[in-house]
Image (cartoon, grey):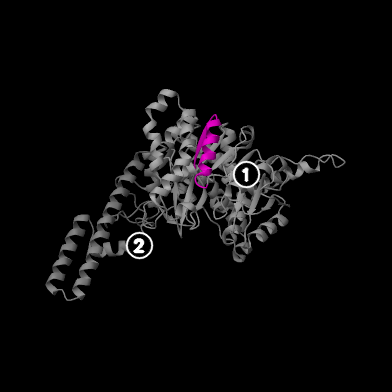
């Protein structure tokens, strides 16, 4: 636990890490290991959400980090909450100071930070468990100086993913400027919390927040830093949950004149950044675009409940339910291990713009040697025939997989079934509306005429009204009725259980094969599986891990035996 009391008047030079104060006090103490990341959180009257924020930081899969909480003169329970965490976990360091503003709080934390990298959080927000791990790995693997990640925008119970740069490679500061100039006031570029910085660059250039600026001070810090970076990596994975609070400056009612006055104080920094990363000719050519920032305003395209791409909060990441009933279940270890793997695979899905089920199918086929049968893939992944068919259609469309001739016919038949199902649904919806009209006094002849029209429409689609009613009652996820080797057609003219369709499209005949384009995905899957394994085996020495692998191999043999006879 480290708890410090400071004054805003304390000089920067005097603010040294606590470990340094031990020097010269007698016997030389062993140097403390340098954490991979210093996570900095300014805190001001954030008691309502502080625990959620801190818990998400302490739950990071990357173990090597320090969490620096700077209490900026809070008058609620925030100081006590922060101190309790510092007492319970040595990775938490708390600094208490009189209220001086968020910039001073962040600067105070930078003065004492020891990590190789620096991350920032806001006390109202939280981050995904793999946030620090993914960002640090990206920085090291791509040898870049800054990582900028996608994030989640949270509005009430709704969440939407936000990002802007689609390139999956390191980019230069000039390329970063090219992207930013299209949307300069977006939170993706202007906020600290979706970025990872190298502390040595911060210290080498003495970069700090400017306390004299009360708006866009974090954006100015980012611009200053990016101008000194050799390369920047856009991580296409959302790792942070941003919640806009009513007390933030951008939510206050400001006149246009007030906005312009504030931005006039910032535009010089912004303009200087482009002068430094562009040559003189390019700067002159794009001067008009650069100045556009002056008349824009900070925004992040809020997630509204009705907006496309939004979803219920909690569905955007794999979750596991930890209850006494779950923990007592003999399959609890397997359940949580599967959830850990799914979460790791979900990061792969985000990176390649796929769904989790897409990655699960690719993983199964990859471990099957690059090719597998449709039926066995559906059985192993737990996907229904229709869902796996849709997934296969998507993967073939992305040229990540291909199907054999039977598979091509099968996918066409599924597409036709889905089209028929849409016709049934539309017809039944219209029937419901018409029946409502009949109940409200519509004539009997009109209702009879409508039913005749409905029957004709369903007949055109290849089904009787009775069949349509039965079919519509089933979940779309279940798909067409399936036998052991064949499927009934959604239109009623199916093959029946145990029969093979005449067109040779039975699922048992379909084969899935991965293409060369899937190789980057399979490499990412293998690494995700290694991460999941390491997390599950944390604390076991190599001998124990080897012994566990032997036991699990034996369990697999025993469990497979009844199905092999």
10 Å neighbourhood of mark 2: few (<14), some, or many (≥20)? few
The nearer-to-camera label among 1 and 2 is 1
Question: In the drawing, does residue 163 fall left or right of residue 128?
Answer: left
Query: What's the mark number on residue 398?
Result: none
Is 228 covered by the magenta stretch? yes
Residue 504 visible in rendering = no
Is 233 covered by the magenta stretch? yes
Q: Classify mark 2: helix, strand or loop.
A: loop
Residue placed under numbered mark 1 in the picture: 107
Residue 248: image location, x then y, percent: 50, 54
Q: Classify mark 1: helix, strand or loop.
A: helix
Question: In the drawing, does residue 394 fall left or right of residue 432?
Answer: right
Residue placed most toward the observer, 177 or 57: 177
Quick check: 417 above or below 405? below
Total labels: the figure holds 2
10 Å neighbourhood of mark 1: few (<14), some, or many (≥20)? many
In the image, farthest residue toward the left: 445
Residue placed under numbered mark 2 in the picture: 474
* Mark 1–mark 2 distance (CA, rounded to whole Å): 59 Å
Residue 122: image location, x then y, percent: 56, 51
Which one is earlier in the sequence, the residue at label 1 or at label 2? 1
Q: Which residues are magenta?
A: 214-236
Residue 183: image location, x then y, percent: 40, 40
Residue 545 visible in rendering = yes
Residue 174: image location, x then y, percent: 46, 29
Question: In the drawing, does residue 15 fall left or right of residue 426?
Answer: right
């Amino acid at each position: 636990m480290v708890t410090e009391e400071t004054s805003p008047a304390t000089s920067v030079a005097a603010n040294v890490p606590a470990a340094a104060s031990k020097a010269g006090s007698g016997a030389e103490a062993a140097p403390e290991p340098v954490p991979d990341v210093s996570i900095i959180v300014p805190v001001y009257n954030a008691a309502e959400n502080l625990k959620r924020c801190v818990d998400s930081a302490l739950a990071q899969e990357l173990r090597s980090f320090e969490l620096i909480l700077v209490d900026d003169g809070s008058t609620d329970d925030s100081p006590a909450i922060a101190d309790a965490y510092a007492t319970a976990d040595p990775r938490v360091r708390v600094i208490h100071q009189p209220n001086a503003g968020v910039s001073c709080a962040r600067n105070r934390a930078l003065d004492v930070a020891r990590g190789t990298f620096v991350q920032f959080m806001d006390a109202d927000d939280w981050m995904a468990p793999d946030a620090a791990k993914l960002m640090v790995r990206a920085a090291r693997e791509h040898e870049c100086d800054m990582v900028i990640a996608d994030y989640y925008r949270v509005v009430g119970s709704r969440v939407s993913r936000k990002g802007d740069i689609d390139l999956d490679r390191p980019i230069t500061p000039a390329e970063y400027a090219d992207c930013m100039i299209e949307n300069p006031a977006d939170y993706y570029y202007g906020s600290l919390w979706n970025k990872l910085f190298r502390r040595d660059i911060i210290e080498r250039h003495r970069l700090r927040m400017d306390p004299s600026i009360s708006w866009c001070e974090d954006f100015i810090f980012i611009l200053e830093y990016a101008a000194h970076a050799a390369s920047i990596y856009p991580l296409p994975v959302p790792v942070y949950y941003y919640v806009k609070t009513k007390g933030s400056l951008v939510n206050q009612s400001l006149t246009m004149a007030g906005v312009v006055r504030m931005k006039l104080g910032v535009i010089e920094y912004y303009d200087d950044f482009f002068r430094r990363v562009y040559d003189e000719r390019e700067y002159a050519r794009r001067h008009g675009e650069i100045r556009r920032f002056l008349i824009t305003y900070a925004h992040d395209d809020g997630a509204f409940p009705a907006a496309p791409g939004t979803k219920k909060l909690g569905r955007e990441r794999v979750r596991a339910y930890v209850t006494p009933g779950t923990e007592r279940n003999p399959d609890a270890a397997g359940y949580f291990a599967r959830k850990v793997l799914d979460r790791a695979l979900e990061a792969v899905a985000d990176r390649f713009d796929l769904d989790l089920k897409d990655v699960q199918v690719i993983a199964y086929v990859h471990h099957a040697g690059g090719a597998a049968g449709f039926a066995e893939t559906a059985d192993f992944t737990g996907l229904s025939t229709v869902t796996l068919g849709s997934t296969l259609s998507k993967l073939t469309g992305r040229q990540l997989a291909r199907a054999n001739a039977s598979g091509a016919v099968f996918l066409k038949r599924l597409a036709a079934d889905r089209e028929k199902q849409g016709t049934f649904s539309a017809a039944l919806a219209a029937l419901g509306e018409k029946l409502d009209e009949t109940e409200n006094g519509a004539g009997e002849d009109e209702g009879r005429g409508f039913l005749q029209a409905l029957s004709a429409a369903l007949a055109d689609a290849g089904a009787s009204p009775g069949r349509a009613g039965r079919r519509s009652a089933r979940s779309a996820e279940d798909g067409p009725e399936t036998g052991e080797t064949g499927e009934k057609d959604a239109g009623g003219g199916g093959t029946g259980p145990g029969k093979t369709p005449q067109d040779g499209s039975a699922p048992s005949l379909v084969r899935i094969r991965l293409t060369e384009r899937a190789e980057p995905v399979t490499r990412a899957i293998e690494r995700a599986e290694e991460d999941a394994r390491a997390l599950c085996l944390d604390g076991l020495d190599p001998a124990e891990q080897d012994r566990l692998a032997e036991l699990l191999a034996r369990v697999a043999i025993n469990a497979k035996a009844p199905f092999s006879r």
